[in-house]
Image (cartoon, rainbow, N blue to C red):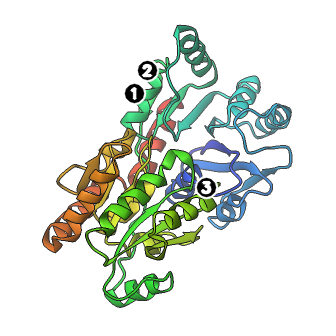
Amino acid sequence: MTEKRMKILHVLTDRNIGGAGRWLLYYLKYHNREKFAVQVVLPHDSLLVAAVQALDVPVLAMEEMEDKSFDRKAFKALAKIFRAERPDIVHTHASMTARMAARRARVPYIFNTKHCMEGAPGGLAKKILRREINAVFSDKIIAVSKAVRRSMIAGGTKPQEIAVVYNGIERIPIPSAEEKAALLSSFGGKAGEKAVGMVARLEEVKDHETFLLGAKRLLEKRKDVRFYIVGDGSLRKQLEQKAAALGIREHVTFTGFLQDVEKIEAALDIAVITSKAEALCLSILESMIAGIPAVGTDSGGVAEVIRHGENGFLIPVGDSDALAERLDELLADDAKRSAFGAQAKRDAEATFLAEQMTRKIEKLYLEAGK
């Protein structure tokens, strides 16, 4: 007799493919189809719709859903879906409305993945409110790093409600020297240049200004470096103007959004993240699994990825001088850069593969169903 599959509904409100979307796609690619029947609820115009369907996973597309956590008008539609589908678990990604609707529809178990750092703890009243909301509308919260878990506990969430499961990634093909040169050349790279890049949304929390200031400082010492700012966002024009004002615009490439971002992540000599707050940082992990060392700010979960002095360097948040110094140290020493890169690849493969993440998530699902 065939064992009944556990029915899981994932809910995302994202219209673009960000960190939560990539988490979902990795999970869907590796989930156990014999034990779990998975569907995904998305806005009808989300870029994730086609990506999920390409993995042969059903999508429940909603006209009513907005790209925000609390969406009053989506509540009834979500509750109707949950009553009709009768899932064993609704697994949300930031959608407070979906958690509320799942509770109203009497879904047996509600999961929520916390993909970002919790906001400032606030006063006692705010902590109590956050604790009660999480307790009422989530049976299990998955934090993508220990730092996220700590921030949630500081904000009032009960520790026993939170499980840490690191984000998972896939191995990235490592380009040959010729492939690397051709790719970087397509973005303005020149022969003999070293490639230092940052893959992140062009938003305030990522602190690209520190990246540009560090670039200026490094270029005062050596000119054989090109800096790649990969991604898009509301600050693009402002950052382009900042690069020009610093006199380094000719050494900085803004690639915009790239669909196959892993190719440039694997073509860098050093990967950088300068975030003021970071849950884990998938882009750094993806470069590391391709054997690229990293320099990142000691913010949130970055220290769980970059091991200072072993696979990269940690620097204080906002310290452009420290960024320039560490980049110079790695660029000046090919042997150290290579050794750090090799260790980065080993570390990423040991802890951050998508298959590992998926098995841990499914173990939590099965425990909930007992």
Q: Which amino acid does label 1 sit on?
A: Arg
Q: Which residue is drawn at 43% across and 74% down?
A: 251
Dot 3: element: loop
Comparing 177 with 134, the one in front is 177
Dot 1: element: helix
Please say if 77 is above or below 210: above
Cα distance, mark 3 to mark 2?
Answer: 31 Å
- Residue 141: x percent and y percent? 51, 31
Mark 2, other Cα within 10 Å: few <14 / some 14–19 / many ≥20: some
Q: Any mark on residue 235, and which?
A: 3
Marks 3 and 1: which is nearer the front?
Answer: 3
Please say if 21 is above or below 360: below
Q: Any mark on residue 154, and which?
A: 2
Mark closest to the chain's N terminus, 3 or 1: 1
Residue at the extreme top of the image, as rendered: 124
Is residue 78 at all visible to an observer of this figure?
A: yes
Q: Any mark on residue 150, and which?
A: 1
Q: What residue type is labelled 3?
A: Leu
Dot 2: element: helix
**Do the numbered discs 2 and 1 sit on residues whose CB atoms are within 8 Å?**
yes
Tally the marks: 3
Comparing 87 with 341, the one in front is 341
Cα distance, mark 3 to mark 1?
Answer: 30 Å
Mark closest to the chain's N terminus, 3 or 2: 2
Please say if 216 is above or below 88: below
Comparing 295 with 9, the one in front is 295
Please say if 22 is above or below 225: above
- Residue 312: x percent and y percent? 24, 56
Cα distance, mark 2 to mark 1?
Answer: 6 Å
Q: Residue at x 30, y 59 (%)?
A: 294
Is residue 1 at all visible to an observer of this figure?
A: no
